[in-house]
Image: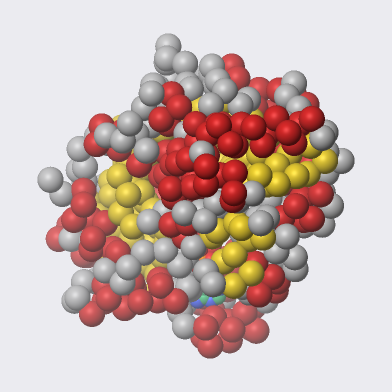
Amino acid sequence: MAKKILLGCIADDFTGATDLANNLVRAGMRVVQTIGVPAEALDTDADAVVVALKSRTVPPAEAIAQSLNALDWLQKQGAQQIYFKYCSTFDSTAQGNIGPVTEALMAALGTSFTIATPAFPDNKRTVFKGYLFVGDVLLNESGMQNHPLTPMTDANLVRVLQAQTSAQVGLIDHAAVAQGEAAVRARIAALQAEGVGIAIVDAVSNADLLRLGPALKGMPLVTAGSGVAIALPANFGIAPSVQAAELPAASGLQAIVSGSCSVATNQQVLDFIQSGRPAFALDPLRISAGVDVAGEALAWADQHIATGPVLVYSTAEPAAVRAIQGELGVEQAGAMVEQTIAAIARGLVERGVRQLIVAGGETSGACVQALGIAQMRIGGQIDPGVPWCFAASDVAPEGLHLTLKSGNFGTADFFSKAFAQLTP
Ligand code: ADP
């Protein structure tokens, strides 16, 4: 039986879960990420488990049900503190789900106070006087005001959160945070006396988060982006160590599948091709015409894979993507390409690939599902927000190394850098 975990985390989306896990590993915790709520008890030792949900934009009642289910499982694994993780741009709809889920977790944990802060200075997300900045501008000027699912039109997080919850929302401002633990604890006591249930916390630097950390010791529930994670392991007596990121030795063949069309991924694909490595481009129109494009890609891979990494990609420039979307419809094109890439990923692992890079958030979700992966051990960081992971799959029961790169992460040489990191 596995030892009890210390920190139990509930993340409202998949790549956000990995981002949090990555920060906890960097701060010294050994971390497992699960895809959804596991049916069984944890069968491996870990200091923290991050349960990845898909609850950011579902109806609030559904998000609450998923989150309470995750809470129940994490408590059964011994979690002493619960961390509800959301996006560092506080992505939410008018109904939630940050407020409703926070309230439900507080009730289930029997606690009347928690904090909320998406501050993540490493990624230029800072909070001052309760206002969220993305880089140099306010949240509502950052482009997030035009997000298709969660438009953020107000940067004042006290107001944003207050609209989503019946709990009273207050602010622990920078003046308190800058003075450290005692001042934060005093501010919390004062807010609680006023009836405040959830306090937005200012933080403009990692030093602020590290000053805040000790004041969160023993708080049953913490809600935050991934930034606060850098300060929590120390509360459990854990310091950064290389052991936290240790994965089994890498073996097997290497491959990359890419369904991301972001600027960064376009550069990474180009960089790989220009280095003279073998690459196979998927044509969405042939997929929609019913051609077995996955079969073609795998037959091509058979010719090249023994001698080094291969790349299979649908990655394209914006104009090409728009043309395909115009022809097939946005969702239809997306789903079709995702399913094809997922089938290719599975075929590659069946052929002996044990070091797999997947580029694209949605693409990663489809691949993990096709590979029958239920949980991943989190290893060392390749680039900010992107660690190597190790996971068992039904087509690789002994496990494979994989990394799930969400669109805009990673330097241009990410693919070669990632494989080099696995080579001793
Ligand atoms: P990112 O992390 O960059 O947003 P995602 O995988 O989340 O990447 O999203 C990319 C979406 O674009 C997926 O649904 C994918 O199937 C779709 N897609 C990939 N290539 C193409 C293409 N050539 N034309 C149209 N859609 C594409």
Q: Is residue 378 left or right of residue 193?
A: left
Farthest right residue in view: 166
Question: So how many labels did they put on this image?
Answer: 0
Q: Looking at the picture, how far across and down is residue 180, in whole percent?
A: 51, 39
Q: How is the image coloured?
A: secondary structure
In the rendered view, would you say 393 is above or below 366?
above
**Residue at the spot x=53%, y=34% of the render?**
181
> Residue drawn at (49%, 47%), measured in percent from left and top?
208
Residue 375 at what x, y percent from top left? Answer: 46, 35
- Please tell me which residue lies in front, 377 or 391: 377
Horizontal placement of 238 versus 115: left or right? left
> Camera-side residue: 117 or 413?
117
Q: Nearer the viewer, residue 372 or 224?
A: 224
Name the residue at the top extreme: 1
- Asked which quadrant contains residue 394, the reply is top left
> Residue at horizontal 67%, vertical 37%?
187
Residue occupying the point 69% across, 70% down: 140
Q: Specify the quadrant of the image occupied by residue 116.
A: top right
Q: Up-down: is 335 above or below 182?
A: below
In the picture, the quarter occupied by the C terminus is: top left
The part of the image, by quadrant, that contains residue 112 is top right
| Residue 53 in view (yes/no) | no
Screen quadrant of the N terminus: top left
Q: Is residue 165 above or below residue 258?
A: above
* Residue 212: percent from left, percent from top: 52, 39
The answer to whether any part of residue 316 appears in the image is yes
- Residue 3, given in percent of the width and then of the height, sits at 42, 14
